[in-house]
Image (cartoon, rainbow, N blue to C red):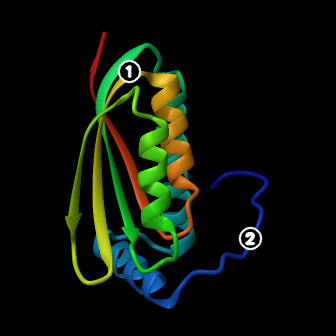
C-alpha cells in the first residue's frame, strides 16, 4: 500500500456509482478505493501521454454528450467553427433519446488539437471525450 494515504469524499450520481460497482465487482477489485486509485493512475498516464505528443497528427475526437443539457449542442458546433483549421470532418450519431456521439476528425498540430479537446471536455453535458491519434509525422 502507498504511504501517506489521504482520504477524500466524492459525490457521484447514483447510477454512475452503481455502474462503477458492477464493473469493479466483475473485474475483481477488492474495494472501490483500489478501483478508483487504478482509474486515477490510468487518467494521469493518459494525460501525460497526451502532453508529450507534439507535431502534426491525424486523429479522431469522440465526444458523448447529453443533448438535453441547455446549450451543449450549440457550444460544440461553435467550437468546431473556431477550430476549422484542424477539423476535416464531423459525424453526428444519435445514441438514444438522451445521448449523442460526435466524432470529430482532426488533422493538424497537436497543441491545437489538445486545445479543442480541453475546451470540449469542460463543457457541461459532455460525459466522455476520447482522443485517438492515428498518425504522427
Residue 4 position in % (x across, y down): 79, 54
Whole-angstrom CA distance, mark 2 to mark 1, is 39 Å
Say which of 71 and 109 sits in front. 71
* Vertical arrangement, residue 125 with respect to residue 11, above or below: above
Quarter that holds the C terminus: top left
Give me the disc on residue 20.
none
Q: Please tell me how crowded label 2 is: few (under 14), some (14-19), or many (20+) other residues with Cα within 10 Å.
A: few
Say which of 78 and 18 sits in front. 78
| Kind of element beneath mark 1 | strand
Residue behind mark 2: 8
Residue 101 visible in this rendered orientation of the protein:
yes
Residue 74 left/right relative to 115 = left
Residue behind mark 1: 108
- Tag 1 or tag 2, which sits nearer the N-term? 2
Q: State the image quarter where residue 51 is shown.
A: top right
Residue furthest out toward the top: 137
Instruction: Name the residue: 35% across, 78% down.
Output: 25
Residue 49 visible in this rendered orientation of the protein:
no
Residue 31 position in % (x across, y down): 50, 74
| Kind of element beneath mark 2 | loop
Say which of 111 and 18 sits in front. 111
* Vertical arrangement, residue 21 with respect to residue 34, above or below: below
* Vertical arrangement, residue 13 with respect to residue 7, above or below: below
Amino acid at each position: 500500500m502507498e504511504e501517506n494515504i489521504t482520504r477524500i469524499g466524492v459525490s457521484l450520481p447514483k447510477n454512475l456509482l452503481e455502474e462503477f460497482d458492477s464493473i469493479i465487482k466483475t473485474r475483481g477489485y477488492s474495494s472501490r478505493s483500489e478501483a478508483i486509485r487504478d482509474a486515477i493512475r490510468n487518467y494521469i498516464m493518459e494525460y501525460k501521454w497526451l502532453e508529450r505528443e507534439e507535431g502534426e497528427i491525424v486523429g479522431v475526437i469522440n465526444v458523448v454528450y447529453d443533448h438535453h443539457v441547455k446549450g451543449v449542442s450549440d457550444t460544440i458546433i461553435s467550437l468546431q467553427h473556431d477550430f476549422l483549421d484542424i477539423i476535416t470532418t464531423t459525424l453526428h450519431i444519435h445514441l438514444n433519446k438522451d445521448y449523442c456521439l460526435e466524432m470529430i476528425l482532426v488533422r493538424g498540430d497537436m497543441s491545437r488539437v489538445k486545445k479543442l479537446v480541453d475546451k470540449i471536455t469542460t463543457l457541461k453535458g459532455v460525459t466522455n471525450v476520447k482522443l485517438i491519434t492515428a498518425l504522427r509525422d
